[in-house]
Image (tube, rainbow, N blue to C red):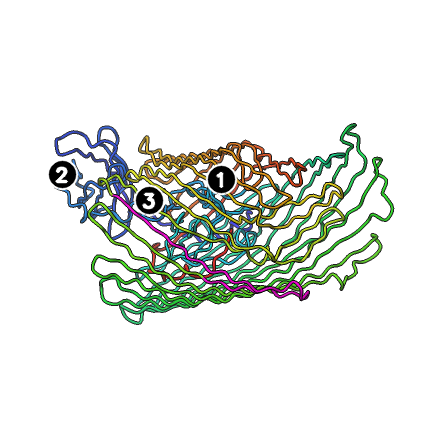
Amino acid sequence: MKKILTPIACFFTFYAYAQTEVKGSITLHDGSPAAFIDILIKKDEKYIDEVSTDENGLYTTLLEDGTYEFFFSDAGVQIAKQNVSFHQDQEIGVLVLPKPENIALKETVITGQKKLIEKKVDRLVFNTDLAEGAKGGNALDALRLAPRIKVDESTDAISIIGKGSISVMINDRLMQMNSDQLASYLKTIRTEDIEKIEVITNPPAKYDATGNSGIVNIVLKNAKSESVNGSLSASYNHQKYGGYNLSGNVNVRKGKWTFTSTVYNGLGKWYNESLTHTYYPDETWSNESYNSNNNKYIGGRIGVDYEINKNLITGFTFDTSNGDGENNGQSTSTIRDLISNAPKKYITNLRDGSFWDWNYIGFNYHVIKKFGTDGKKLTFDFDYSGNNNTSNDQTISNEWDANWNAFPNTYQGNKTYTFSDSDRFNVSVDMEHPVKDWKMNYGTRLRWATDQANNTRYNTSSPETPFMEQPSLFTAFEYRENVNALYYSVEKELSDQWTAKIGLRYEGAIVKGISDQAEENYRKEFHGLYPSAYLMYQAAENHSFSINYSRRVDRPFMWYLNPARVKMNDYAYNEGNPDLTPSNSNNFELEYAYKDVSVSSIYYRNQNDLFEQVQIIDPETKIVINKPFNIGKTYSIGFSENLNIKPLKWWKINASADVFYRKTTGGIPELSYSIDGITGEFRITNNFDLNKKKTLFANYTFNHETKNVYGLDQFGAYSRHNVGFRAMLWDKKLQLSANINNLFENKNSTYRSRSNEIETFGTNTAFRSFRIGIAYNFGKYFNIERSKSNQEQAGGKA
């Protein structure tokens, strides 16, 4: 780690401004102290500091000579603004806030003052700059702290609490990757490069209908005015083993040109231990397993925009990344007699030698045409995304008697070499068309997608014999999907208090499956209408109510549809299912927001033809097949609460609670049962300012999840304690951070599943991990206007 950080630290140049500690006081118009008022200080369009008054209306900050804008707010609501001049030979004195009725709020909006969580009409906004626990981490670390979002500790799969899987966008472009590829890609994005994360639980008609539970949009920082900015960073993380990430970026805007660039390189390592017990009528199978893998990656992004004139912008972005990794692990299954509990035999599996490599390319070309100054705008986007993956899944298994003597002719090695390739082309046109007080939005999106996979099987029957190809077991599968979409929505302020928005989206999909086995070929068509509706009531300045509805769809992707079978041993197989059908859902939400302090939601969701990968167990042969099926239907109803509280000027709290009831009913013979239960997921994040200069910070986050059900499985309760520290030096341009996750190394939750009335109990071991990081930022950070129809790119499910 020292070798990594030393050359970066040598780059840093020290400089400091001649600042003076300034003390002042604020009173209300009646002469009483303005207690616990937030003050945002701005100079030359740059935000200098944010401080708070104490119970006596006193505050302290560091200032140079000059004129500043002071913005005053109470509980997130701006109450006044004043211009203040400071010179070292003078004092600011007492500032008096005017009466509320004398404040022109529309003229004093603080666009730079942010809360950790902000409520918008159709989404929650999570401002990652204020999330201390994510500092020095990556996009996946930030998502773990975002409201309503859950990131599975074992698989890194992303979902909305109480609902299910979601689509993930980056800068309004939906990522077409499987969950493993997406998790690896998100780990390449620094938290410090993220401006905000938008959680859209009920997306409007403009957005792709894919993703039954909604969309999460990760918005990256970029350029706005003539300037240069960038950063260099390095981080080291350690779970059971260590890994690192190096990153650098430069953003330039000069005249009519905007240029952005990022490069990164890293190594991620992961380790897991698990224990499962499967109870058959005559035997108990206990399996102890461990896996370790590492993934090396390198990549970069560039973007260029050119302003042809004030009403016409064109540009492109290019994104590429690739990586390779290996998996090492082994497991031992102990087969015991159900009555005596004595061992009958053992089965060992060695997975050393498995490896994979992957690469991803994304390209977008866009044109933005504005018509006048009334907000009318036409956006055209062409998108291409391609990713391919080569994997080698290898398992060597053997069977032993109760005294660990090898059974004859049971040694076998199974290896499956898979090459998969994906290409997606998208064309979208989006029109924002206001007419007086009507805001219309309409457009279209066309997508052509092709996925291919070839599977070659090898095996051996002894340690001395090399793996031999089995041509009769070769499989090839191609999946083609064409989706055409049209959408229209309109929004109108019905009165000073009421706002309504309705939309309708049509999607027609034609899918084809082409296999080397002609009898498995198919062609299917799916057509659907996906309405959305929103109604918002602004009861008073600080109180709002909204109700919304949307219909969504989840379509199975290539990694579920490929029928190829991967053999681990005589008792374990993985395979896909080309007979999967899309799953549709209906989503309702009722929300109440009080200032930026509280957002409360009641939600209901139902979903038919739910598809998941499940275990199908044969009670007679003991063979287990992992295969996706349309397993049945599910519904959930719940309550969500998010609070932003500031008990003291140096202590900020974000607390969230989700309590919901969920029921799933199985619809296939092997899983013909129902399961339901109430789940509670709670999180409280404490952020502490450790000094008056606001250059030292600490945070503590506590998570707790009660017993719960998901799909047709049951899970036990578990808790997590995470802590972090951050220091900012050299005029806040140098940042040092340290975080510890799972401080007390609490165990993962247990789980229970059932198949053909055979029950399995298991648990995964959770480990403590820590991360340290260093980053140097130069220049100013800002945003550019982005293409708004890019969300129409093909969606990926996390």
Q: Is residue 325 above or below residue 91?
A: below
Going from N to C along the chain, the mark reached first, 2 or 1, is 2
Q: Secondary structure at mark 2?
A: loop
Q: Residues within 10 Å of mark 3 (few under 14, many from 20)?
A: many
Q: Residues within 10 Å of mark 1 (few under 14, many from 20)?
A: many
Where does residue 177 sit, x and y in percent of width and height? Answer: 53, 57
Going from N to C along the chain, the mark reached first, 1 or 3, is 3
Q: Is residue 790 magenta?
A: no
**Magenta region:** 508-537
The residue tagged 3 is: 547
Going from N to C along the chain, the mark reached first, 2 or 3, is 2
The residue tagged 2 is: 98
Mark 2 vs mark 3, CA separation in Å: 36 Å
Q: Is residue 7 visible?
A: no
Circle 3: residue type: Ile
Circle 2: residue type: Pro
Circle 1: residue type: Asn
Q: Nearer the viewer, mark 2 or mark 3?
A: 3
Mark 1 vs mark 3, CA separation in Å: 39 Å
Q: Front-most of 517 and 360?
A: 517
Where does residue 260 sit, x and y in percent of width and height? Answer: 41, 62
Residue extending furthest right?
A: 408
Q: Is residue 112 visible?
A: yes
Q: Is residue 272 above or below residue 394?
A: above
Residues at circles 2 and 3 in contact by the CB criterion of under 8 Å: no
**Dominant SS in magenta:** strand
Q: Secondary structure at mark 3?
A: strand
Q: Nearer the viewer, mark 2 or mark 1?
A: 2
Where does residue 264 sit, x and y in percent of width and height? Answer: 51, 57
The residue tagged 1 is: 739
